[in-house]
Amino acid sequence: MVRKVGQEVLILFVLFSYLFCYVFIDFTNLSSLFHKVPKELLNMNTIFISLFLEALPFVLIGIIVSSIIHVFVKPETISKILPKNALLAFIPVALIGMIMPVCECGIVPIVRSLLKKGMPPYIGIVFLSSVPIINPIVFTSTYYAFQSNSQMAFLRLGLAFIVVLLIGF
């Protein structure tokens, strides 16, 4: 347990150090160094920071929801909520994806917590499949991308729901 906590502390320290340098160090005064650094390395740094900052809120939402599940949800609650019939359990789990604004990286800790609480693995697969493709952010971005044809967003939502149910079956 101590080793795992030590690793997590080290990872958090490295991430916060990187963010601290990014936010608080004025790199404009170091412009002479930029001529010596390959452009590929600078591009890699820009891509890394942009992906990290884009994914961070969704991962944090996943971690917060996972922590809430870990602390407040009892194993018997999971068995009471889910229907006994496996085929009927797919539908509500797939529909949860429509309200959870979490990406594929943020849903993993949530499903892991639910599996520890007694959720069957086949339901976890449906949950892992539905949330990243059937969530409000994906729907909104699709709706915005196809403003001239708003029907496209609803078709995407419906087809994604069908695909998730097929994965479950």
Image (cartoon, rainbow, N blue to C red):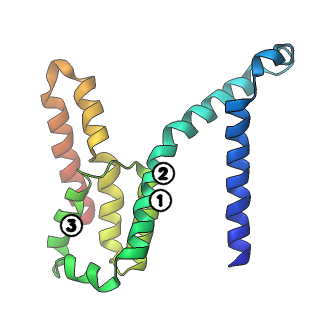
Whichever of callouts 3 and 1 sits on the residue coming sooner in the sequence is 1
Residue found 55% across the figure and 37% down from its top: 53
Which residue is farthest front? 24
Of circles 3 and 1, which is in front? Answer: 1
Q: Residues within 10 Å of mark 1 (few under 14, many from 20)?
A: some
Residue found 15% across the figure and 45% down from its top: 158
**Badge 2 vs badge 1, beta-carbon distance below 8 Å:** yes
The answer to which quarter of the image holds residue 68 is bottom left
- In three-dimensional space, the C-alpha distance between marks 2 and 1, rounded to whole angstroms, equals 6 Å
**Badge 3 vs badge 1, beta-carbon distance below 8 Å:** no
Query: What residue does disc 3 label?
Result: 90
Residue 103: x, y in percent? 40, 48
Mark 3: amino acid? Phe
Report the disc number at residue 59: 2
Of circles 2 and 3, which is in front? Answer: 2
Residue nearest the observer in this picture, 104 or 10 = 10
Residue 163: x, y in percent? 23, 52
Report the disc number at residue 63: 1
Mark 1: amino acid? Ile
Which SS class for mark 3?
helix
Q: Residues within 10 Å of mark 3 (few under 14, many from 20)?
A: many
Mark 2: amino acid? Val
Which SS class for mark 1?
helix
